[in-house]
Amino acid sequence: MSQPCEQLDDYLARDLDPDHEVRFIGHLESCPSCRLAVESEQRLDDLIFEATERIDGAPIGLVDRVRRKRRIQVVRSSLSIAAALAVAMGMASWAWRSGPPVSAPPRIEIAAAPPSQHVMVDFEPGSGVTGVAMPSDSPNVTVVMMFMDAGSENPGVER
Amino acid sequence: MDSRLDEWTPRVYRLALRLSNDPHVAEDLTQETLLRAWRQVHSLREPAALRVWLFRITTNLWRDRLRRRSPTAQLDHDPPGPTAEPGRSLSGGEELSRAYRAMCELPPRQREVLHLIACEEMSLADVAATLGITRESAKANLSLARKRLRSILEPEPASRP
């Protein structure tokens, strides 16, 4: 058996690379036994192909059903994205309206004293702030000057 | 993908039918395959590999179904045969009908390999890739399938005494 004939099985199994396939097809012209084998397999494959083509037609309307399902899929996907965007925008809006978190201002206790005198005001211990009440023209208004303590040893104001 | 749906739907359906031997399952598999392909088509790097990629999805979906079935479930149904498509006439009738039945009765792997080779004209390498098997296995199954079909369709003449 010559070497090309040994490639018969590979050719029938479509396992030859393009170059070898072309060479083997050339070989068929001069080798009746290989040609006979190829024609026999080809007839069988053709019969299977034809039978399948005629009998296995896709059900009527299958393509339309696939298209319809695809449209539903796309709509669902779009709705999911829209819902996610709406939630994200809602959260952003809520955060913007709320502003940054605000802590309660330190409570101020003002010692009872006539408005004409300087009054020492103590904030909560540890707040580091000292307020001094100043006289004003109105008896109903007290102006409070606030000083940040540089340190507990030197409050910066006379007590 | 949409523009090629008319072309691919029958081909995917035929493979699904070869895999399942059941027209209803084949229709489901076809729909699932095409919808999944539509969703994931961006992941296909080589458009030339579309057929292997698409058929691979079908094969994987079929394998998933088999795994979900109970172990006692019958895996193969009666082949649909020519009567499954009423209204279709078979010219060349009897021979095609016999060939079709013979193919449907092949063991699943032989049937799948033969379909991809004879009907899709795939290379052996692509068949192996589609079915997730080695080339050697694909080749062996193809050889067995053809041998078996030939024995059914071309019976040896009985030897005379």
Image (cartoon, coloured by chain):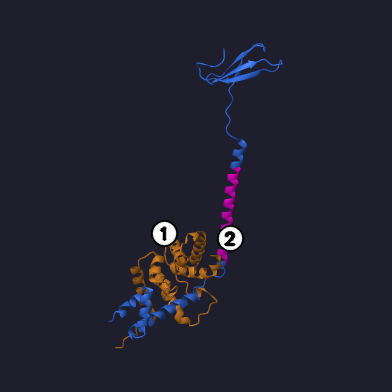
Which corner quadrant holds the N terminus of chain A? bottom left
Kindly indicate which chain is depicted in blue in the rendered structure: A
Q: Could you tell me which chain the residue with mark 2 belongs to?
A: A
Is there any visible trace of residue B154 in the rendered image? no
Q: Residue B32: image x %, image y %?
A: 50, 62
Residue where numbered disc 1 is placed: B67
From the image, state the color of chain B. orange
Depth check: give the residue in front, A27 or B70: A27
- Residue type at numbered disc 1: Arg
- Give the magenta range: A64-90
User: In the rendered view, would you say B72 is above or below A36?
Assistant: above
Chain of the residue under label 1: B
Residue annotated with mark 2: A71
Asked if residue B117 lies left or right of residue A101, the reply is left
- In this rendering, the count of numbered labels is 2
The answer to whether residue A136 is magenta is no
The answer to whether B41 is drawn above or below residue A92 in the figure is below
**Residue that appears at 38% across and 74% down:** A18
Secondary structure mostly seen in magenta is helix
Inspect this view and state whether residue B117 appears: yes
Give the x, y percent position of residue B130. Answer: 41, 66
Above or below: residue B66 compared with residue A146: below
Q: Quadrant of the C terminus of chain A?
A: top right
**Classed neighbour count for the residue bearing mark 1: other residues with Cα under 10 Å, few (<14), some (14–19), many (≥20):** few
Quarter of the image for residue A109 reads top right
Identity of the residue drawn at 38% across and 67% down: B128
